[in-house]
Amino acid sequence: MAGMMPDSFSARLPLSRSGVDRDYLARATPGLLDELRADAATRALLLSRGQALLSSTDPVALDLVPFADVPRAETAVYLGRIAEDALVDSGIVGSGVVAVVLSDEQADAIQADRGSWGDLRRIGAELSALDAGLFTQALAITNFHASHTFSPRTGEATVPAKGGWVRHPDGHDEESSGQHIFPRTDPAIIVGVLDDQDRLLLGANALWGGDRYSLLAGFVEPGESLEAAVIREINEEAGIVVVDPVYLGSQPWPFPASIMIGFSARLAPGSPDAVPDGEEIIDLRWFTRHDLSDGVRTIGIPGRASIARAIIEQWFGGPLDAP
């Protein structure tokens, strides 16, 4: 991503990468999507059931097809233009890209084999910076559209506007209605907690069945600072007190609309022992680097696309090879 140091922590976050100029000023252009459809250079990222169409020749690359060839769909969003520093074929640099959500029938007509559609959680770390940024952006904004078909203020049906970056009540003039509904992102903190022996605290979430462990995390509450959320969430889930929250980096997590904000923190002297809350977290363990080494590790760990994996590997001092 432009302006990001190649050896920085943020540069190692797969879904924070991008090769897109969001071209946000163009969103206000009247008839923007029709204009883009008329441009033979415009490409479309096709989505179906939360998955993106993959290249027939490369299973970890998106198939960006001509927008003009794509059937019209209820949800289409202008993502921006392929940036000059995207490190791709110069023939597509500058091309506009539109995310299109297909109906099941439209998707099956294009590619009925579901193995040709990719899941961002599974392949995000393997995608190029351009494809990872496009897929993450597309999934986040189209999730917004799927959950805001009616106004939360009035209950009226809503329609997209401004290239797909806002919705307003159907039948109202876009500018005069005063009822614009903008996309939202829900902030969540995720924390690498260390004790005085430099061991890392990992927990097993009740939803995972007890065989996979990850960092503790939680949503930021209204009126709460990020640092306060770190201290509160760790205390709620593990019963311990932490100090010195230090910001590491952030990564969008469009499942459906979060941004994960990474921190490290230290166990406070005299803190009680870690005890799982029994609701979200069913087990907690302190791990040494030896415990998590390949060939020694006996637990599942977060996938490569997650910021949790990046924080664990930063503490570990290098990559962990297991999926």
Image (spheres, grey):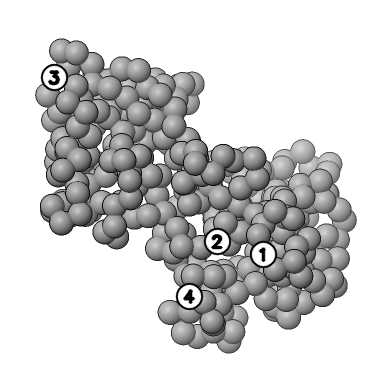
Mark 2 burial class by Cα count in 10 Å: few <14, some 14-19, many 20+: many
- In the rendered structure, which disc, 4 or 3, sits on the residue that comes first in sequence? 4
Per the image, the residue denoted by label 2 is 128
Mark 1 burial class by Cα count in 10 Å: few <14, some 14-19, many 20+: some
| Left or right: 25 in relation to 182 | right
Q: CA distance from mark 1 to mark 3?
A: 53 Å
Q: CA distance from mark 4 to mark 3?
A: 48 Å
- In the rendered structure, which disc, 2 or 3, sits on the residue that comes first in sequence? 2
Q: What numbered label is drawn on residue 59?
A: 4
- Which numbered mark, 4 or 1, is in the foreground of this view? 1
Q: Are marks 2 and 1 in contact (CB under 8 Å)?
A: yes
Q: Position of residue 256 (x, y in %)?
A: 47, 51
- Which numbered mark, 4 or 3, is in the foreground of this view? 4
Q: Position of residue 84 (x, y in %)?
A: 74, 55
Q: Are marks 4 and 1 in contact (CB under 8 Å)?
A: no
- In the rendered structure, which disc, 4 or 2, sits on the residue that comes first in sequence? 4
Q: Secondary structure at mark 1?
A: loop
